[in-house]
Image (spheres, grey):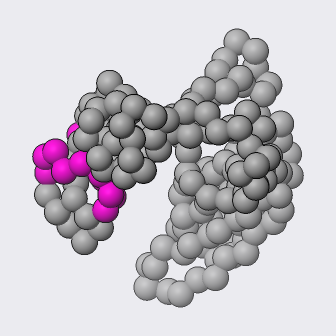
């Protein structure tokens, strides 16, 4: 493992994880290369899971490219959130102006990509407390119901099932350092 001692900060400080270095946020584990210390830990060049970037300087986080599920001439570039499932998310802002509802249109490929959607809606306070409800996702869209007002929404869908806690004896681990994966 090329000197890797299961200490991510040590591993990252050796620069073996990647060649891409850029400014970005960093969690409590990682190399303090440059930046400030805040409530969540140092801010510097590398985070515990690799390089992070902000703004228009390039991709952020753990990016990957997948085939577009409904247009063969395109690719999809997504970035990972970490959790015990493989999922996708979309988010945005909206406003009800007709006193009844607003339609949120998700990308056309969503029906071919994810299922089992969870929707969250948060009202923007404008002097009145509002409660919003929503429909199920159907035909790549959902409705938000309530009084006139602005809101933020997020939609999270399950992409595929994964085995979250496999036995080590059943998995062939590939990679090095914090970048491990399996063939299974």
Which residue reaches farthest right?
138
**Image: 1 above or below 5:** above
What is the x, y in percent for residue 139? 85, 45
**Image: 51 above or below 129:** above
**Quick one: 90 or 173, which is closer to the camera?**
173
Quarter of the rendering occupied by the C terminus: top right
Q: Magenta segment range? A: 23-35
Q: Residue at x 64, y 82 (%)?
A: 131
Quarter of the rendering occupied by the N terminus: top left
Q: Is residue 33 magenta?
A: yes
**Quick one: 184 or 63, which is closer to the camera?**
184
What is the x, y in percent for residue 61? 44, 41
Lateral position of residue 165 relative to residue 5, left or right: right
Q: Residue at x 47, y 44 (%)?
A: 178
Lateral position of residue 7 relative to residue 13, left or right: right
Question: What secondary structure is the stretch in magenta mostly built from?
Answer: loop
């Amino acid at each position: 493992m090329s000197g890797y001692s299961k200490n991510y900060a040590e591993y990252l400080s050796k620069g073996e994880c990647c060649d891409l270095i850029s400014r970005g946020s960093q969690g409590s584990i990682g190399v303090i290369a440059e930046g400030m210390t805040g409530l969540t830990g140092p801010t510097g060049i590398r985070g515990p899971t690799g390089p992070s970037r902000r703004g228009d300087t390039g991709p952020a986080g753990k990016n990957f490219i997948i085939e577009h599920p409904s247009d063969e001439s395109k690719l999809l570039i997504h970035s990972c959130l970490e959790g015990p499932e493989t999922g996708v998310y979309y988010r945005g802002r909206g406003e009800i102006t007709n006193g009844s509802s607003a339609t949120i249109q998700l990308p056309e490929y969503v029906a071919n990509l994810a299922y089992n959607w969870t929707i969250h809606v948060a009202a923007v306070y404008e002097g009145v407390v509002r409660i919003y409800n929503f429909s199920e996702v159907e035909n790549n869209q959902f409705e938000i119901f309530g009084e006139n007002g602005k809101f933020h929404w997020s939609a999270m869908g399950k992409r595929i099932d994964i085995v979250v806690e496999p036995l080590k004896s059943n998995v062939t681990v590939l990679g090095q350092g914090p970048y491990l994966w399996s063939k299974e």
